[in-house]
Image (spheres, rainbow, N blue to C red):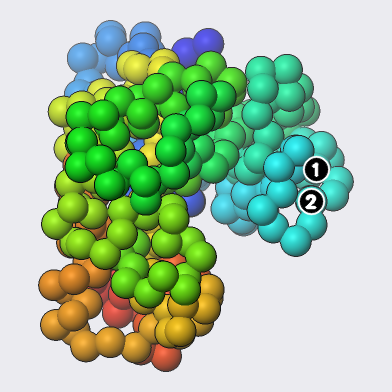
């Protein structure tokens, strides 16, 4: 079991690179008990985590590294255009790092068994799902929750969702959405906290703490000990809620002053609260798609 959870860390190492989170930070969330080697040598935990991941990466082929960046959508819930095909063979070849939309212990175990029995490096899958406002127990939509101004209650809803989702085999939720939006024509305004950057920042912190546990901070590895906590994913970096005309995926064009004063604070608040991962947005920023925007992702975020 210890080896299983050690290698699970690498399931998201390249995702962490893309999202701007350090490999050693994200890896630490998965480890539970220190291995014999670390105990015997009295090696610092952070040092052992980094060395373990570095050694594992050194063993990987280019194809296997690319595979760890591959998040396939399968299962009963579909948010993309089509379901992935040939999933089991891809998993066995080490061409899949994570699975989106598969949940339930029988389904997760069946896919995980393929990795552990047939793949070369046996790097377990990470299971992600849109746990947005509850999992089995459904709470009001995030915009409605924000109207309560009750941060303790909002944090408790995220904690309850994490408890239920982890019991259903899910490791990673694509929440909270912290995009500030001031155009009611944008349909996804319902998934955020509305128009105010201060309230949005406080709710972002509450959601992260609910999913991952209170007292977290950037680089904190204590989440690895909590079986009922989820990796959170702050989205969508950046400015997704400012799409022109409220048209989803449309371009965004704004001054730096408005950007930093009104739209950026909730992202920063969520990261400082210890958010494990960050999702890039689907819009342009200064005419360059966010996912390939060096100024946004390298100069500013990293």
- The local crowd at label 1, few if under 14, some if 14 to 19, many if 20 or more residues have their Cα within 10 Å, is some
Q: Which residue is mark 1?
A: 87
Rendering coords of residue 121 (x, y %):
63, 33
Residue at 24% over, 45% down: 203
Rendering coords of residue 241 (x, y %):
38, 69
Res 126 label: none
Residue at 63% over, 43% down: 100
Residue 237, by quadrant, is bottom left
66 up-or-down from 44: above or below: below
- The local crowd at label 2, few if under 14, some if 14 to 19, many if 20 or more residues have their Cα within 10 Å, is few
The front one of 29 and 66 is 29
Residue at 37% over, 50% down: 143
The front one of 251 and 292 is 251
236 up-or-down from 289: above or below: above
Which callout, 2 or 1, points to the residue nearer the camera?
Answer: 2
Rendering coords of residue 200 (x, y %):
23, 54
- Determine whether, in the image, residue 98 is placed left or right of residue 294: right
83 up-or-down from 32: above or below: below
Rendering coords of residue 286 (x, y %):
35, 89
The C terminus sits in image quarter? bottom left
Q: Which residue is mark 2?
A: 84
Secondary element under disc 2, as helix, strand or loop, is: loop
Residue at 79% over, 51% down: 83
Residue 47, by quadrant, is top left
Q: Are marks 2 and 1 in contact (CB under 8 Å)?
A: yes
Q: Is residue 260 visible?
A: yes
159 up-or-down from 16: above or below: above
Residue 298, by quadrant, is bottom left
- Determine whether, in the image, residue 222 is placed left or right of residue 27: left
């Amino acid at each position: 079991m210890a080896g299983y959870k050690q290698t699970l860390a690498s399931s998201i190492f390249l995702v962490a690179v893309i999202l701007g989170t350090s490999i050693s930070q994200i890896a630490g969330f998965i480890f539970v008990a220190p291995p014999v080697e670390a105990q015997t040598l009295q090696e610092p935990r952070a040092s052992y985590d980094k060395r373990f991941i570095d050694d594992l990466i050194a063993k990987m082929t280019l194809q296997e590294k690319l595979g760890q960046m591959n998040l396939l959508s399968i299962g009963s819930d579909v948010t993309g255009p089509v379901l992935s095909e040939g999933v089991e063979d891809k998993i066995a070849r080490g061409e899949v790092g994570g699975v989106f939309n598969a949940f339930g212990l029988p389904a997760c175990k069946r896919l995980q068994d393929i990795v552990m029995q047939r793949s070369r490096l046996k790097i377990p899958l990470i299971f992600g799902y849109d746990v947005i406002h509850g999992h089995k127990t459904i709470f009001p939509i995030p915009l409605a929750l924000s109207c309560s101004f009750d941060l303790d209650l909002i944090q408790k809803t995220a904690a309850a969702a994490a408890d239920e989702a982890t019991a259903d085999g899910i490791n990673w939720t694509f929440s909270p959405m912290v995009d500030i939006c001031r155009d009611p024509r944008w349909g996804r305004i319902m998934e955020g906290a509305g128009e105010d950057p201060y309230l949005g920042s406080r709710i972002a912190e509450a959601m992260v703490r609910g999913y991952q546990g209170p007292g977290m901070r950037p680089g904190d590895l204590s989440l690895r000990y909590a079986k009922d906590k989820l990796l959170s994913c702050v989205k969508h970096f950046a400015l997704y809620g400012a799409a022109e005309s409220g048209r989803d995926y449309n371009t965004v064009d704004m001054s730096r002053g408005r950007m930093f004063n009104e739209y950026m604070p909730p992202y920063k608040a969520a990261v400082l609260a210890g958010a494990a991962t960050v999702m890039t947005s689907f819009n342009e920023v200064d005419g360059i798609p966010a996912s390939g925007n060096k100024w946004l992702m390298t100069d500013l975020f990293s």
